[in-house]
Amino acid sequence: MVAVQDAMDILSGKWKIMIIGSLSFGKKRFMELIRDVTGIGAKMLSKELKDLEDNDLVKRTVYDTKPVTVEYELTEYGHTLKEVIGSIAQWGSEHRKRIFGK
Amino acid sequence: MVAVQDAMDILSGKWKIMIIGSLSFGKKRFMELIRDVTGIGAKMLSKELKDLEDNDLVKRTVYDTKPVTVEYELTEYGHTLKEVIGSIAQWGSEHRKRIFGK
């Protein structure tokens, strides 16, 4: 149980797993993440991204463009979560079939 | 992403995954769950168990003993989450090694 608890301390909350899910498809800008993670607000997304950066799961790159552009991507360590996200997504799609029959 | 979102709508919150993790080891009484899921309070546990029952993931059995005893167990459908919990636990133990080096 400790292992599940350790993981959930990092992943807890509704949004982190969805942000990681979105980034597992590739680099994203802030506004792309806001569109991809349905229902999240800008303030919450900033906080969750900061947590994920602190836990070395997400890397933030600032490009010196006008205006400045900021990109987020999974670190190598962040990519180790792909299997977890994959099994959650797998369960989610079977759950959808069971509930909605499609 | 919809699949991840569907799963997280059911599993969201810090406790549900840990409750399912605990029940994946077998039937538990309420007080056993309180001890197993470190940090959860009785009120929160009741609410989360009710959600899990509503989603047909947990079954509640009341035994006509004196005093009454109540047991919780994963439904057949609840057991389909074992793989998700397993991959979360796997990641959690590797995370622990990475952070604490043990």
Image (spheres, coloured by chain):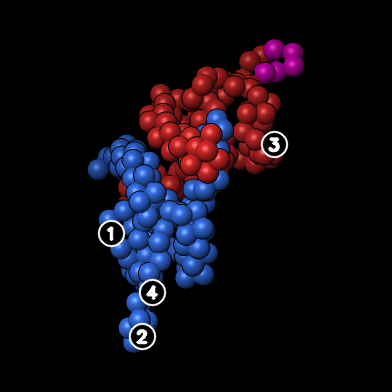
Chain colours: A blue, B red
Q: Nearer the viewer, mark 2 or mark 3?
A: 2
Report if residue A33 is visible in the image: no
| Relative side of A79 to B49, left or right | left
The residue most toward the front is B101
Q: What residue span does the magenta drawing correspond to?
A: B65-69
Q: What chain does mark 4 sit on?
A: A
Q: Residue at x 40, y 66 (%)?
A: A60
Alpha carbon of mark 4 to alpha carbon of mark 3: how far?
A: 46 Å
Report the residue marked by disc 1.
A26
Label 1, secondary structure: give it: loop
Q: Indicate whether A49 appears above or below B5.
A: below
Given the image, on which type of amino acid does mark 4 rest?
Val
Q: Nearer the viewer, mark 4 or mark 1?
A: 4
Q: Position of residue A31 (x, y in %)?
A: 37, 72
Which tag, 2 or 4, sits closer to the chain's start?
A: 4
Q: What chain does mark 2 sit on?
A: A
Q: Position of residue A45 (x, y in %)?
A: 47, 65
Q: Indicate whether B12 appears above or below B67.
A: below
Given the image, on which type of amino acid does mark 1 rest?
Gly
**Label number found at residue A62:** 4
Q: Are marks 4 and 1 on the same chain?
A: yes
Given the image, on which type of amino acid does mark 2 rest?
Pro
Q: Position of residue B68 (x, y in %)?
A: 70, 18
Alpha carbon of mark 2 to alpha carbon of mark 4: how far?
A: 11 Å
Magenta-span inclusion, residue B68: yes
Alpha carbon of mark 2 to alpha carbon of mark 3: how far?
A: 51 Å
Alpha carbon of mark 3 to alpha carbon of mark 1: how far?
A: 41 Å
Q: Nearer the viewer, mark 4 or mark 3?
A: 4
Label 2, secondary structure: give it: loop
Q: Circle 2: is it few (<14), some (14-19), or many (20+) Cα within 10 Å?
A: few
Magenta-span inclusion, residue A102: no
Quarter holding the N terminus of chain A is top right
